[in-house]
Image (spheres, helix red, strand yellow):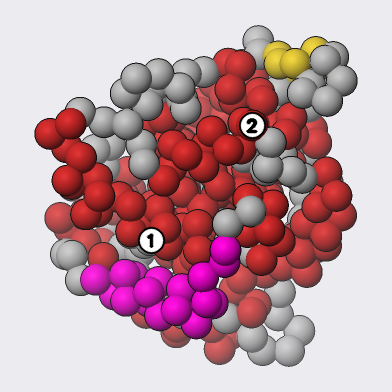
Amino acid sequence: MDENAGPDPGLYGPGSVTWQCHGDPVMWIAGVRALYLQALHPRAVRGVMENSSAFSGENGGDAWGRLLRTADFVGTVTYGTTEAAERAGARVRKIHTMLSATDPATGARFRVDEPELLLWIHCAQIDSFLHVLRRSGVPLSAAQADRYVAENRVNARLVGLDPSGVPEDTAALAAYFDRIRPELAAGPDARAVDAFLCAPPIHPLLVPGRNLVWRPLAALAYGSLPDWAHQLYGRPAPAPRSVTRRLRLTGSLLRSIPAGLRWQLPPGHILKAMRRMGPGSRPAPYTLRTSAAILDRPGRA
């Protein structure tokens, strides 16, 4: 190792838009939106249903574990060292190579690591993260939003995709959804995911807490879906202005919780990254505001 080299910033680093965004607490709402969106691809959601108990079982199967593992993966890839991120990606790719499922339309077996399925999962996730962040008040400029999409082709590579075939900006991401929409549907598996997210089964003593905290957040995640997704699910879409107001209010409330307290929750990726990189690496919205003018100058990517 070069003794003069600085600390390892990982695959993104503090100079990236992703580093500044992924510490925001609305990412949990964005993650639930991603689940709603991902479930609309019949083959992708069948791969989940056949290979895990995430949305089945008396107590909701392993859905909570799945959510936490996804959050841990995103946190490791964003804030971990290069070695930790590459190791996490290798682990995901290895697991995927061992899994297959049955096509609900044809009955044929397929591998869950087919590029088209991995691309759907990736795009649904990145679109959800970006949409909820911006709509809840995170000050991302148009150029920063494009940069966020481009940066996360790193994430796509880690799960087994060729980055050259992954949307590189918001326009390409929108074009991807236009292209994939005829393949989407809310079949029985999507309905099962929807039912779980609306009212996940938990211990009876925890039901009041679920109804008070989880249901409003899940409803907000669902409400933030695009109109065509509401049409597929067959449930009325709430008024967009109302959803935006609630997202901004919820974002403000969640951000009022001291970051040091929020980041104490395990596995503490952000605090570990700040110890490694120094206090100047702290994710903060003002960093996005001060860099927006530079990124939005003509000729800047």
| Left/right of residue 170 with respect to residue 217 in the rendered view | right
Nearer-the-camera pick, 214 or 281: 214
Residue at position x 70%, y 80% in the image: 300
Disc nearer the start of the sequence (1/2): 1
Magenta span main SS: helix
Q: Which of marks 1 and 2 is in front?
A: 2
| Left/right of residue 30 with respect to residue 44 in the rendered view | left
| Left/right of residue 175 with respect to residue 10 in the rendered view | right
Residue farthest to the top, as pictured: 98
The secondary structure type at the circle numbered 2 is helix
Q: Mark 1 points at which residue?
A: 26
Residue 185 position (above or below residue 295): above
Residue 167 position (above or below residue 56): below
Q: Would you identify the image quadrant in which residue 50 lies?
A: top right
> How far across and down, in percent of the image, does residue 153 sit?
68, 49
Residue at position x 87%, y 54% in the image: 179
